[in-house]
Amino acid sequence: MNSWGDFNDAVSLPDDGERDLPAGGQIALDRLPSAGQSMPHPGAAIALDREQIAAFLEVVFGYCDGLIPVRGFVDQGQGIDSRPHNIWILADQHAAESLGTFAAWAARDGSAVYVIPGTVAEHGQARAEHVLQMQAAVVDLDTGDVEAKLAHLLQHLGAPTLLVESGGRTAEGAAKLHAWWRLTEPAEGADVARLCALRGEMAEKVGGDPHFRSAHQPIRVPGTIYRKGGVERVVTIRHHDPRREVDLGEFAEAVAAMPFLPAQERAPAAAQSDRPGLDGVLTTPVREGAQDGWTRFQGASAAIGHFVRQVHEGRLTPDQGWEAICGYNAACLRPPWPLERLKAETDAIWALHVDRNGPPLLRADSAPPAAVPTHTLGALLDDTSPMPDDLIGPRLLTPGGMLVLGGAPKVGKSDFLISLLVHAAAGAPFLRFTAPRPLRVFYLQAEIQYHYLRERLQQLHLDRDVVARARDTLVVTPKLRMLLDEQGVPLVAAAISQAFPDAPPDVICIDPIRNLFDGGPGGEGENDNGAMLFFLQSRVEALRDEVAPEAGIILAHHTKKLSKQQVKDDPFLSLSGASALRGFYTSGMILFRPDEEQTPRELHLELRNGPALSPLLIDKVAGRWVEMDRRGERLVRKDIGRKLDAERLRKHDVILGILLDEAAEGRLYPMMQFAEVFENKAGLGSKHTIRERLSVLATKGFVKFRRDGSDFGFPVVRSRFGYLCVEGMVFGSAVETIDPTTGEITSAAKPVLPSHFKCAQTGNALDVENPEVWVYPEGVLDDLTPEELGLTPHSSRKTSP
């Protein structure tokens, strides 16, 4: 482009022809409608050709790595107004299947399918500078004598790898063609620019489409449907030679040696001279189909870029700038663009301009006197009215506030969040947090499918009264395949209103941000600050304002990979994505596991509207989240301490197992005799170590005693305690007995029941009241670790008096 467009710093977008590229939203493949779901427009009358799609991908992306940017938007002339869609698919063995799925959806939606013929690194990337690899040279023959142009290319460059009929027709009625030459290896770095220059040079010499000088210029996919002007055709491969490949250097030499097709030498200069200057851009009508030597897109993007700069510099207010853009659209574009597309292009250019030039100097519209609320210092000091009740206290979630819960995958974030929401919906305390009353909670989640969601909820160990109070006040969605975009917000708002018809919700929870994120017209991801602010302000807060302006928002978010020490130093630095999120919320929580080999988690809290809270050490015990006592946490030699703990637990289990096995074989032991017999066996150590372990186990109630062994062929002992006895112990093998009444024969081993136990306070031997019921000392089970509780799988459920 020459000086006529120098002022336009907008992102390079295509013109009105086959190169129309929307600035619309991004969707994921799992969001596409499945078979049997209704579509907004009738399905295609002709079928896709998935084999041609696969052949095309092999030629254009077969050697590439990364993501393929795919575009889907409605062809002109169908009378359909549908929002464009962008997706990114991996350039791997599944690419043909993924693109075929998208193409099938696009066919039902009445959309055309385009790709940028190069790969990028991340979702949301689609500009020329984002393209990392390209492996094919292409020329688009869309005007004039197409066959003569093709013959000229064949004569000087040789046969192409792929020749595609794009579906369009020239003014002479000839099929428009795309000719592809596959390279022997992908072009990277500077070679990408070299390849794009070759594409432009080929187009200049034969009168092809000059837009393919840009790496991000999209092109139709063979095997998909062309519907421009109401005509339906399959984009068809005319010729395919999979063995045909060219070296980039040799091909560049051939292109340089290729002469201009007659009458093409002066075409570029003529085209440049037809483009007006800035004043002409704003006043010269431009017709569809590049009838004036330049396209509606070029005129619109130039005009929009001009008015965007005026607004950015404060010369126009945003409303005045938009009014000027709409005026240009109505006066100069023939026919005008739909307002939806005009708004999308304007938003995209604005976002890029702000990204390149910094924050705008916005000129405020004239506002009524009380549009911005203000308060004097005196008024604030004199206002002693009661503070509003916290939704979840203390100050964790306030009316109109936003709480962000972050955590690494599999740390238990969703499980913790569900427990918090259930207790809030019941008005019951949870850990240190309380709700003043049962809250109406809407849980919008996009991770767990229905059956696994109900399984997880049923596995929670909740008090019956908590469940009873929360049954109707907590409303949960199954896994949703949607974005919280301009279509998603009204859908969710309608679902909330239907769930709570009588009163608005108190809490709206979104889990997780990543699965519902919409970065706006630019399609940027969650790592972009502008996109994150757009999502929070224009999507999340817009949803709240529509259904319940005073509701609290809870957002679940992932954390990025940092070292354990970095997380400890600043836990909220680990929140994934843009830093704008941390400056936006009113309170935050980070769920963090300091030791991957241990189950306890640390819960760090950050409050903007309240005093700081110290981190909590929490764990899930017996299906419930509980706060652990930090006083029992080691401060030094933690690794050695954990190993010693593990060794004690091992000896605990080994001793109980040996006692059970020995009794089953007909042997009972007093304490000292057992220690001497099994000294240095099974890693138990000396007899003194074994006796100390037995003494501890007896104090905790895992071991009890029987003094009279006569029922088993052993004498009555006169020692302080007696024979060792553990829960579930049986003596010898099963013995058959005959019921004298019924004659039924049964077999059962003889149980070894205790007669005495060691008092946990005095250490004296006391009589067992009921040998049939194994009772543990009061409070012992509460002090046991999860490992100790699960050590003896043979044991029945443990109870304390």
Image: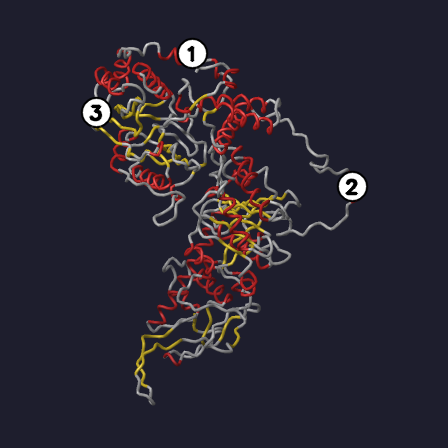
Report crowding for label 2: few under 14, some 14 to 19, many 20 or more residues within 10 A (C-alpha): few
Q: Are marks 3 and 2 in contact (CB under 8 Å)?
A: no
Nearer-N-terminus badge (1/2):
1
| Badge 1 amino acid | Ser
- Residue 44 at what x, y percent from top left? 32, 41
Disc 1 or disc 2, which is closer to the eye? 1
Q: Under tag 1, what secondary structure?
A: helix
| Badge 2 amino acid | Ala
Dividing the picture into quadrants, the one containing residue 746 is bottom left
Report crowding for label 1: few under 14, some 14 to 19, many 20 or more residues within 10 A (C-alpha): few
Count the labels in the image: 3
Q: Which residue is mark 1?
A: 273
Dividing the picture into quadrants, the one containing residue 25 is top left
Quarter of the picture holding the N terminus: top left
**11 shown above or below 461:** above
72 vs 282, left or right, is: left
| Badge 3 amino acid | Arg
Name the residue furthest bottom. 741
Q: What label does residue 379 carry, if any? A: 2
Could you give the CA–CA distance between mark 1 and mark 3, rounded to whole angstroms?
A: 39 Å
The answer, for residue 662, to whether it is visible in the render is: yes
Could you give the CA–CA distance between mark 3 and mark 2, rounded to whole angstroms?
A: 81 Å
Could you give the CA–CA distance between mark 1 and mark 2, rounded to whole angstroms?
A: 66 Å
Report crowding for label 3: few under 14, some 14 to 19, many 20 or more residues within 10 A (C-alpha): some
The answer, for residue 569, to whether it is visible in the render is: no
Q: Nearer the viewer, residue 722 or 580?
A: 580
140 vs 586, left or right, is: left
Q: Which residue is mark 3?
A: 244
